[in-house]
Image (cartoon, rainbow, N blue to C red):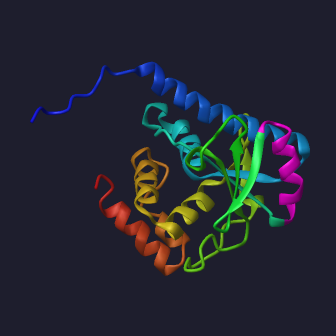
């Protein structure tokens, strides 16, 4: 049986995919900025923002856009983003926005509500949108709050994001003392083996 081979490497498709995520991020945050709706970029894009400040070549690509908002701002967020080419959806308890041109859930703009648990089993709620700072183009969650979110969910991709933050020097051995015991223990695991 022949071994399957990969086709030629298409760098252009990779660049296009990254640019589509960036365009979606800027379009969504620009709409929120214009509407005066408080928010914070979270998730992989927030990690990328922080990592890029130390070492742009260490930034990882992410497919989706995650935004933290106050629940009472969702009603204003919907028309703001729909005017910018998104379609609001709510399914399986998740609020998200698809691109009007046939976007998929995996590459949507996902909404997380501030001061609420993302999942019932999570030890602590999501941060407040007040724990954000204005970057060049959009508001991003402050590093300490972002790390807290990553430690709370602690999925494999969260652990990788934490490793990235450690490897570029944004998190050091002094950080576990900033968090409750469970989160401190998780962070110490990462610090003890940052290249796992």
How many numbered markers are drawn? 0
**Figure quadrant of residue 101:** top right
Q: Is residue 149 left or right of residue 156?
A: right
Q: Position of residue 40 (x, y in %)?
A: 72, 52
Q: Position of residue 88 (x, y in %)?
A: 76, 51
Vertical comparison of 147 with 152: above or below:
above
Q: Residue at x 40, y 60 (%)?
A: 156
Q: Position of residue 191 (x, y in %)?
A: 36, 61
Q: Residue at x 83, y 53 (%)?
A: 38
On the rendered image, what quadrant is the N terminus found in? Answer: top left
Q: Is residue 194 left or right of residue 100?
A: left
Please check the rendered image and state whether residue 41 is part of the magenta-colored stretch, yes or no: no
**Camera-side residue of 196 and 119:** 119
**Camera-side residue of 36 and 82:** 82
Quick check: can you spot residue 195?
Answer: yes
On the rendered image, what quadrant is the C terminus found in? Answer: bottom left
Vertical comparison of 102 with 167: above or below:
above
**Camera-side residue of 97 and 15:** 97
Q: Position of residue 46 (x, y in %)?
A: 60, 47
Residue reaching furthest front? 1
Residue reaching furthest left? 1
Q: Main secondary structure of the magenta part?
A: helix
Q: Residue at x 61, y 31 (%)?
A: 20
**Camera-side residue of 40 and 9:** 9
Where are the magenta residues, as a range? 72-85
Q: Is residue 137 left or right of residue 145?
A: right
């Amino acid at each position: 049986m022949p071994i399957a081979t990969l086709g030629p490497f298409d760098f252009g498709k990779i660049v296009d995919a990254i640019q589509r995520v960036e365009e979606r991020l800027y379009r969504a945050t620009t709409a929120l900025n214009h509407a005066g709706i408080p928010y914070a970029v979270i998730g992989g894009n927030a990690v990328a923002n922080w990592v890029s400040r130390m070492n742009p070549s260490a930034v990882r690509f992410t497919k989706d856009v995650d935004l933290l908002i106050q629940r009472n701002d969702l009603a204003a967020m919907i028309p703001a983003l729909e005017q910018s080419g998104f379609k609001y959806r709510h399914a399986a308890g998740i609020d998200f926005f698809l691109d009007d041109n046939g976007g998929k859930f995996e590459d949507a703009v996902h909404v997380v509500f501030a001061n609420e648990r993302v999942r019932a089993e999570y030890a602590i709620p999501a941060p407040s949108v007040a724990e954000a700072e204005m970057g060049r183009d959009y508001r991003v969650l402050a590093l300490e709050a972002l790390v807290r979110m990553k430690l709370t969910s602690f999925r494999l991709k969260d652990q990788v994001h934490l490793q990235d933050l450690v490897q570029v020097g944004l998190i050091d051995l002094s950080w576990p003392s900033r968090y409750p015991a469970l989160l401190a223990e998780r962070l110490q695991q990462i610090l003890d083996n940052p290249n796992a």
